[in-house]
Amino acid sequence: MYRNLIAGAWLALATLPVFGADVKAMLKEADNFRITADAMVVDTQVQVMKGGSLDKERRYTVFLKPGRRSIVLFKSPAEIGQKMLMTGDDFFLLMPGTGRPIRVTPQQKLLGDASTGDIATMTWAEDYAGTVVGEETVEGKPCVRLHLEATRAGVSYARIELYVAKGSGEPVRADLYVASDKLAKQAFFQLDMLDGRRQVTVMRLVDQIQTNRETLVRYVSRKPKALPDEYFNPMFLSRSEIRE
Amino acid sequence: MKRHTAARLCAGLVSSIVSVAAAAEGEFSAVVRVVPEVRALRSDGPLRESAVLTDFGRDRLRAEVEARGKVRAVSYTGTLRTTALEGLEPRHEGILNELYVDAPLFGQSFTLGKKIAGWGVGFGFRPLDVVQQQDRRLLYQFTLEGIPAIAWEHFTESSAWTVLYANPTNGKGREIRDDESVAVRWFRQSGGTDLHAVARFGERQRLQLGGGVNHVVNDAIQVYGSVLVAQRHERWVNRLTESGGALLSTAYPLYEVQHGRAWQAAVGGTWTGTSGFGVMLEAWYDGTAYTREQWQALARLAEQQDALLGAPGVPDRAVRGNLAWNLRYFERPNLVRENVLVRLSYTGDQWDAALDALFTPVDGGSVVTATVTRQFDRVRWDLGVRRFGGPGDSAAGLLPDRTVAYLAAQVFF
């Protein structure tokens, strides 16, 4: 009896790293449909729909660099000039006309529209760890279901149930849970051929709390671009050199 | 007729801005703001009678077009503003808020031109804002006007140095912001902790030295603090508060008094919940502000002057003029040295709201402000109300204004 238990426990422990490594590889593969280079610039158009009609439209340019570093430039008329810097779990915001980058807490970062720009470019492989919990058919596609837990504080969602297509590994749906473990949004991914490779072109976020709200995130362009490291200094936000 | 002229002027400006926006190359954005403001005078108080000679108590309407953009390496922000005060001629002005070039050269970063430079830490009062001060007493914040400067900056990923030469060749200007000065800033980020240090040298305050820290405790809480010491500072004092004799002066009675070292310090923290609610608590000391005794002396003088209104042989105009001169005491970043600010806020998807209460425990004064903001796609509405309270000899209680309310409409292009 004990021998069987010990053998079972040993087997479970022995397979854990392999299982973990597989999930990491699956997440990296799923990321690659949205994040097409290690260092890149992504233009996104975000349309917030309320009751089926357009409530507001926002545009963001997001510069990504390995090491969980990103800079979000707010491009829509009502927000232009705002910049947000994210380095790991540290966040800084520059409001136009102040010249003063201010530190914001992870919780403050989640308030307002800015988090959408963040969501659009989140990297599952860097920010989450998890396990394969089963297989399901989602949106008519056979999928592998991954249960993901955030590995750092600053991410928008504490838990994600991610469905990736069997075989291709492309993301199909993600159920996004906030820290209180409440389902906040469901993300649906639309893929197309772009620049010779299959990429996510639209992410549709269906709000599960305010059920009449839906957000369409269109990936307008993705280009490889590496900003110099010093651009990720919070004080650099007040300078005007950052351009596409 | 004048109102029609102002309206036509604004409409013309908006039309021009939209045309320019449509045709502009490079980055360009514009915002049209219309901000009506209603002010109610307090029913009593010795300085109330001076309001007729000043802007206190006058309803006002400000309409402006602000354009912001970048052409090649040149960034700019400019404003065309019309201000109409109740009972006065409308005033039109053009403001060049910023015009500067940020450019890398030999691996270093340089700035030349007029640029907004906020260096401080905190919300209510920022002692480290040694180059550019933001007037936190304003109920509605319009875009700041930058400081003409030449600056060198050096950045690594986690630290930064700035050396800034402000208002070259200006000497001592009319206000601190106009003073010629050399300022140095050092910044270092280490995980959730930021360290700031500043130094500034100018003719008015001589050497200023300061430091600050900002620390993120957890997902929801951050704390911060900063301290600054100035070698010298100055304040305007009404000589009639010192003489104990004459109550009225035929000539401008305020004179500038030079004082020695002064400290400024602020500590605070914020908490933000998952629901969008937040709390901020901040306390600060400003050694350059007037003392309780100075305010009491001013209140005594103002009461005695006020009592002369209608007295035989004393022209009311002279009394009101003397009362109005006293209002210069309110031209300070902080009215009283010891201040406590509490802010409750809510940030939602559509609505933001905040309730601020500034207390000055030494004199029992208070300034309570409530604001609500609604953001649409290209339109934003702000509504705010502020009420000044406190005993008659407190700084806030002496202000001629009792309540101020505004409604701001902004359209973004």
Image: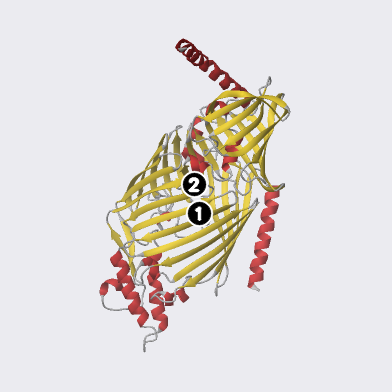
Determine whether, in the image, residue A80 is placed left or right of residue A237: right
Question: Image quarter for residue A215?
Answer: top right
User: Furthest residue to the bottom?
Assistant: B312
Which quarter of the image is occupied by the N terminus of chain B? bottom right
CB-based contact (under 8 Å), mark 1 and mark 2: yes
Q: Kindly identify which chain the residue marked by label 1 belongs to.
A: B
Separation of marks 1 and 2 at Cα, in angstroms:
10 Å
> For mark 2, does the 10 Å Cα neighbourhood hold few (<14), some (14 to 19), or many (20 or more) residues?
many
Q: Secondary structure at mark 2?
A: loop
Q: Is residue B120 visible?
A: no
Location of residue A132 with respect to A240 vertically, above or below: above
Which residue position holds label 2? A99
Determine whether, in the image, residue B97 is placed left or right of residue B42: right
Residues A26 and B231: in front is A26
Q: What residue sits 60% from the left and 51% below the top?
A: B350
Question: Image quarter for residue B291?
Answer: bottom left
Residue B49 in picture, x, y percent from top left = 43, 77
Name which residue type carries label 2. Answer: Gly
Q: Is residue A148 visible?
A: yes
Q: What residue sits 54% from the left and 15% below the top?
A: A18
Q: Secondary structure at mark 1?
A: loop
Question: How many numbered discs?
Answer: 2
Name which residue type carries label 1. Answer: Leu
Which residue position holds label 1? B144
Residue A226 in picture, x, y percent from top left = 57, 28
Q: Kindly identify which chain the residue marked by label 2 belongs to.
A: A
Location of residue B216 with respect to B389 vertically, above or below: above
Location of residue A65 with respect to A156 vertically, above or below: above
